[in-house]
Image: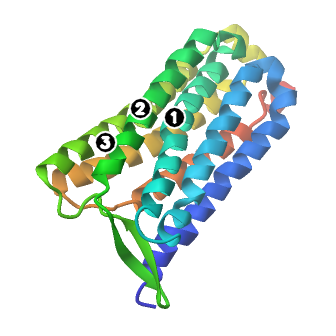
Amino acid sequence: MQYLPNIIVNIFVPICAGLIFLALARYVRHIAPIRHFSAGKATYDAAYFGFIAFGIYLATRPLQILLGPHPMPLIINNIREFFMIGIFGPSVLLAIYGLAFGGESVKKIYKIVFYGIGFICATVFVIVNVKAIGGSEPIFYIGSYPAYDGMWFKDVSAERSFLMKILFICRLISPVILLVIGATIALVRAVTYPLDRKQLYSNMPKKLILSSIGTYCFSLSMLCVGFIWIFVRVPNQWWGYYVGAFLAGFFEAWSISLPLRKEEDL
């Protein structure tokens, strides 16, 4: 019972959060053929890959801590972060842009630029993380079985402190800044949605606002966890990610489930 809160936060909560986004990905795949005409195939493809990547990132947290000591936490963490930084951030931005302006507006050059940014940041993160992690240590026990995690925040030397800043910058660019850009695009488009399109898709402004709120929720939760470490020196506040993820999942599910037109307009 001593480690019950740790077990809940590090095992059950991440799995639940991950399953929410994997379920959203499945639902997106289900409704995509019906809504291609309004937002385009590229939009729903990007949303699908984004939700899959984020679901994998969240749900595999238990693998990072339960497969043994270093280097297993490093290996799993690098895989998880590559999904989030390299795929999730760019995919959500492109999906929101397509939802706001139509799938045909998602040009090939946009995909190259944003996925390129994501993959560069993810690659830098993975390389730097090898030196920044500092080994592993038990963070709690399930019976006598130890759960290991990286020692990013313990006995931080000047060199490792510099490397930690690089990791923070990588995450700041993708997904945080990419998500903030996407959320802002959705919000501005909702406020300025053209009247002629609103007559066709009367629910679209509301869908965009809900998607914007959900996207802001997770990006700001990541930012807060980072700032708590930088300015207050309180490490390992991963629960903030999951709070943001649950809120994001709620608003994204609400947005996706709304029909394109209000019932009274049908």
Give coordinates of residue 141: x percent, y percent. 44, 84
Q: Is residue 34 above or below residue 139?
A: above
Q: Is residue 41 left or right of residue 248?
A: right
Residue tagged 1: 86
Which comes before the other along the chain, label 3 or label 2? 2
Task: State the image quarter where residue 99 is shown.
Answer: top right
Quadrant containing the C terminus is top right
Q: Which residue is mark 2?
A: 121
Question: Which three-letter amino acid code belongs to the residue tagged 2?
Answer: Cys
Looking at numbered disc 3 in the image, what kind of residue is underneath it? Phe
Q: Nearer the viewer, mark 3 or mark 2?
A: 2
Task: For mark 3, give the secondary structure.
Answer: helix
Q: Residues within 10 Å of mark 3 (few under 14, many from 20)?
A: some
Q: CA distance from mark 3 to mark 2?
A: 10 Å
In-front residue for pair 214/170? 170
Q: Which mark is residue 168?
A: 3
Q: Quadrant of residue 157?
A: bottom left
Q: Residue placed at 60% from the left, 29% from the top?
A: 208
Amino acid type assigned to the residue bearing label 1 in the image: Gly
Q: Could you classify mark 1 by the number of other residues whose Cα lies within 10 Å: few (under 14), some (14-19), or many (20 or more)? A: many
Horizontal and vertical percent position of residue 189: 55, 18
Q: Residue 13 appears at what percent x and percent y?
A: 55, 66
Which comes before the other along the chain, label 2 or label 1?
A: 1
